Amino acid sequence: MLAHYLTLGLEESATDEQIRNRYLERIKIHTPETDAQRFQDITQAYEAIKNRRARIYSRIFTGRNTSDMEAALLYLVRAGRPKPKLVGLQELLRAPKPA
Amino acid sequence: MATERPSGGLLNKKVDSFSGPGFYPAKLPNGMAKKKSKKTRKTERKKLLNAPSAQLMEKGRSLTAAGNYREAIDILKLALKKDETNTEIKTLLFRTYALRETQLRQKGMVKEADVIHAHTLSFRPDVQALSENDLILIMKASPLQEALPSYAEYISSAGPSSEAEHIIASRLLTDPRWDLLDALPDTSPLKRDLCVFRDALKWMNEARWKKALAAMRSVSRTSPIAPLKMLCRAMACFYGKDEDGMNRALSMIPESFPILSVFRRVERLPQNFPVLWEGRQVAEDEIHSLLSDLKTQRLKAAIGKIKQISQALFPPAPQAAVRQILQMIMPMGFSGILDEDVLQELAEALLSEADAAVFMAQYYFLAAEDIFEETADYLNMLDSEFADPSDLRIASSLVLTDAAGQISKRHMADDMYGLSVRTLKSLGIASKDAETALIEMTLKAIELDPENRSAYDLLANLPRSSRKSKQLAEQGLLRMYERFSDDPEPCLALSRLYYEKNAFRQAETMLEAAMKRAPYDERVREYRITGLLHAIERNLQRKKLHIVKQDLEKAVKLSGKNTKPPVAVKQVRFEMEQTGQLPLFGGEIQTEKKDIRSIIATVLSPMLLFDRLKTLALLAAEARPGYGPWDTAKIRQLDAVFRPYAARMKELPSSQIRRLLVPEEDRPPYRMKPKPMISIFLDRQPKILNLLLDEDVLPVLEAMLASGLTKACAKEIRRRQKTAKKPFDHLLAFYSLVIRHITDKTDRNAEPFETIVNQVEDRYRELFRAASRRLSVFAEGRLKAALEHFNFKLLNTGCTCPMCTGRAGEAEFFDPDGFDENGEAFFPNIFDGLGELPWGEGNPLKSAISDIEQLVDEMGLRGAPEKIIRKRRRELYNNFQIRMVLEMFADLMPDEMKPLLSREARMLVWV
């Protein structure tokens, strides 16, 4: 479940409409021609959380529907790519700098 | 002031002594400076005290340049003692102190730096005499309130310094004391952009980089706050995912802007600048390492890694990531890589007690070993996972549907006997009959979530033989009918059910409803026509011709490409039955009964030759004396009509002739099997096979074998072999060989088969394998097994086990009683066979492997969880003889051959 939300960049409280809008937004950017893997991930995520029934189904049956554990975990890792964090100047200046 | 240069030999000697091994510490082999002895240091100090000030100053300068400020200060102080009026020494001492102060501040030694700062100020030269570099040193070393007056003085004499302005601007970023800037003259560029700077800084601190950038739109490239504008642009590009723009902007920040120059590195190391990111990127290696830890049962390491990965993946709620990871590794438990205990330990270590309990209940439900009990347990725990009542109902419905589907698919319904009343109640089961119980479970799922489409679909396909189960299924399907009011599928499902109940009129009503819901759906039309044909046949037999008339007219209207011939057959039948008083489509009433030739001619006239031939063949197939209106005379008349058309078959292309001879296997709705046509056509047109191309003849040959026309088939093959080209020459030879083996059961040998197969090019091999599998249905015993597995060595083995004799798929093989009949002689043979043969190509184990794989398929274990396989294995091993065979197989199987077996087969043999 979490992986799907992360892939679409949504909170778990997102509504069906928000999910659909985000899906349409993302597949316009990540088309099968430009980034096939990302497109596949986005479609998979959308199918898994597109409505309440699908979300509940994913929550219960993820364990059984995971045919390739490594691929599933890597999907989670891809989904969990760190997002840019909104920081102000002071935080930026205080932060430890790269060596 | 001119520098006093040392002169004379003595002085030179002294300089040498400074630069000699006594002054520059000798390096040890490992790079460490050798500690000087107290005595040496004392001697050196003495030498220094004796050196002239100019020499000391040069030494101090060189030490400062080398970054050795402490020693430089020491020497310069000595020099100043010797020449107190020398301003050059003072300036040099000022620079060295300033550099030392900066050095200490960089090291975080603030107190020490403050002490040095006092010295710096004491040696500070007059502002008029300051160079820009000195000014920068002062600015860097002084707090803003001290630095600004110095800079103001400097401006008045030397003009603005861009580097100094950068320093002031950078100080103001963290310490925005705008009032101090009053000390600066109006000629300072910073003062000019002060308003913009203030506004922009406010937005920057609030992380509104675009707004800050907009505020600095008027800032010129030469402004001291231009680097800030570049930072704003870089940040705006960063959040806008414009990496190129970000890099371009960052590269324009000058190194002289101290606090911002560090951001130039963001370009190269965006992932290593953690403050800019939420969480961190998890490397693929971490996942591989985690899986490796789990496989090798390194539990502590695995727990640590799951925690780390979860934290990195989703810092706001790492527990959600933990749960997701645990769900993803569940299959390790299903396949036995992880013990259930280990999985439980993981869950308990990583989740709260309640969550771990729910997780394990979910695991056991999905593993589905004791599916009834585990489903009931999971249902009872669902409320802690789904707090929202409507979510809970949907979840319960999905769980029940899935469980009913699994039970049906795996034929586990009988496991319900002996369950507690509580469990049965949780599952919604009230009946004691297994078949009805599954329907009840599905109905409960529908009751919980009336929108659960998968439950309805399951209900439509669950087996129902008893009256009660049909009644319950009808209830559910009627709900489906009402709920999905635009969908024809519930109508089709209900029509099937009504046909099963022999409630024909209701079935037809449902088909009519399906037609209304989806009038242009080809599948619905075919269902409808098939239903009408069913009704027509029934009413023809009951002589209810007025009803037949109505149905027939409907069927003719609906009939399409595939359904024209069967409808035409019923038209002919109707015309044969009626006396002419019921004209179809409002035609003229006939006073006399029509002749069969004219009936057929009328019906066939609008059709193409292919449909005409098909219609005639269908009529011929059902025409037998005593059936309906048929008698010998009428059959003869039909034949007389058929033969001229049969003679015209040469007008058809080869593919259409094949379709006539071998009707394509479609999926008729009510199990109406296609009738064998080959004999009908061959009887009327014996040379029809000559019209077929080689690529179309193979299915026809198989249809001939199925119809028992073995000799005719062999003859046709012989005829074709003379002219056939690749790969059909070998294929025909293969067919011929198979037919010979089918007819002559005594002469069975792998060699001729292998000779043919070995001649075949690799690209055609799959054709042979498929043909072999198709031909296996006409064979029996060892030949059947050999053809099924495309392994002709089986023909040569002496083994008589069910696997090697083609009986592995037979039902009685699994029946302990049936097995016992073969038992006594069977075991010694397989052991002898296995013991005698070499471990090579002729190894019977290879064929046994494919038989075990077949056994896996027959038992429905392919892809099944380990628990199911274990359970089925236990059941199988209850039979002593089967156990002996499999155990012997396990013992004899060499390790190098084990990988040839599938996962399921290995579990069946060795678990």
Image (cartoon, rainbow, N blue to C red):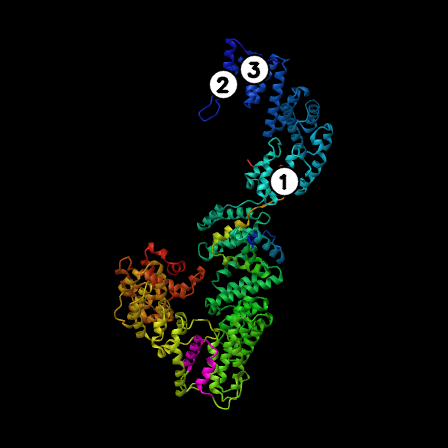
Amino acid marked by disc 2: Ser
Question: In the image, is residue B505 above or below residue B244?
Answer: below
Eye-nearest disc, 3 or 1:
1
Asked whether B604 falls inside the magenta stretch, the response is yes
> What is the C-alpha distance between the residues marked 1 and 2?
58 Å
> Split into 4 quadrants, where in the image is the C terminus of chain B?
bottom left
Are the residues under marks 3 and 1 on the same chain? yes
| Mark 2 neighbour class, 10 Å CA radius: few under 14, some 14 to 19, many 20 or more | few
Eye-nearest disc, 1 or 2:
1
Circle on res. B861:
none
Amino acid marked by disc 3: Leu
- Residue at 54% across, 61% down: B378
Taking depth in this image into account, of B388 and B632 the one nearest to the observer is B632
Circle on res. B37:
2
Q: Which residue is mark 1?
A: B233
Q: Are marks 2 and 3 in contact (CB under 8 Å)?
A: no
x, y percent for residue B388: 62, 60
Q: Which residue is mark 3?
A: B56
Question: In the image, is residue B613 above or below residue B426?
Answer: below
Local secondary structure at mark 1: helix
Magenta segment: B594-622
x, y percent for residue B108: 60, 30
